[in-house]
Amino acid sequence: MTQRAVRKGSGATAAGGTARSYQVKAPAPRILVMLGGPGAGKGTQADVLAEQLGLPHVSSGELFRAHIGEGTAFGKEVQRYMDRGALVPDDVTVRMVSDRLSQPDAASGVILDGFPRTVSQAQALDRMLAQRGNRVAGALYIQVDPEELVKRLSGRRVCTGPSQHIYHVMFNAPKVEGICDIDGTPLALRADDEPDTVRSRLTKQLPPMFEVVDYYADRDLLCAIRGDQSIEKVTEELLHAVETACKVP
Ligand SMILES: [Zn+2]
């Protein structure tokens, strides 16, 4: 309510000067966290949700790249760690995300993607949000069986012609198996995309993510969505979860 109801018979008109105006307390920005293994479709879904919900999609990777590209103080700080081959410390990432949350387009909230990546980052995010009088509204988890992720991540085929056209056996298959549609050269599987290579990468990447999933589940903030459905169906379920379960303080 933006103004007090005008009593019947008060004689006030619609534009009346008798109703006082009241300060409306704005709801806290809605902070959503996207979770899912590589290949689960997290980035794609975050983009769709961002558009549907009118919230910016804040990918920590893109945030790093943007700061580095623009040569900001954050960018220079991050670059120093990367030059040494070191991980960017959590407090730097948290400060960068905090700065992003202060941008005008984030006034209604954000969809975080790629952060938090570990439980200690999730805890740091909670502390930072608490200082802002806020908290995570919900964590959206696109759940895909690890072996399905291996299939998705090892499906890439690259043409051996000079243009290196890219295909995917599941999502963008060539008309003739193993042959580039455009230049007719054979398609190859890169060493990085070999199932065993992908599997050993996932063995390192997934456990910290599962811990973050558990962290939000323990706090009753997790919305798990089955990722082995069409993109549209996953979007629909994510939107439903946001509407029903992701409460803003
Ligand atoms: Zn080609």
Image (tube, rainbow, N blue to C red):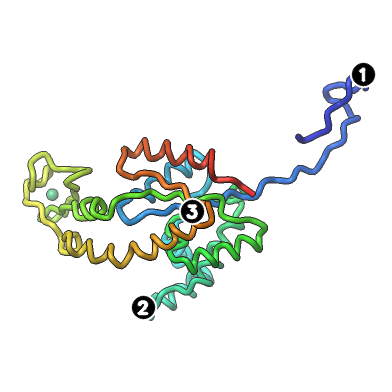
Which residue in the protein does label 3 denote? 33
Type of the residue with mark 3: Val
What residue sits 26% from the left and 65% below the top?
201
What residue sits 37% from the left and 46% below the top?
44
> Looking at the picture, how far across and down is residue 60, in whole percent?
45, 61
Q: Residues within 10 Å of mark 1 (few under 14, many from 20)?
A: few
- Quick one: label 1 or label 2, which is nearer the N terminus? 1
Q: Nearer the viewer, residue 104 or 170?
A: 170
Q: Which mark is residue 218?
A: none
- Quick one: label 3 or label 1, which is nearer the N terminus? 1
> Looking at the picture, how far across and down is residue 78, in whole percent?
46, 72
Q: Secondary structure at mark 2?
A: loop
Type of the residue with mark 1: Gly
Q: Secondary structure at mark 3?
A: strand
Whether pointer 2 and pointer 3 mark residues with C-beta atoms closer than 8 Å, the reply is no
Picture quadrant where residue 154 is located: bottom left
Give the distance between the C-alpha atoms of the residues marked 3 and 1, in whole angstroms: 50 Å
Q: Which mark is residue 9?
A: 1
What residue sits 23% from the left and 66% below the top?
200
Task: Please give left or right for residue 108 compared with residue 146 in the image.
Answer: right
- Quick one: label 2 or label 3, which is nearer the N terminus? 3
Disc 2 Cβ-to-ligand 1 distance below 8 Å: no
Which residue in the protein does label 2 denote? 85
- The furthest residue to the right: 10
Type of the residue with mark 2: Gly
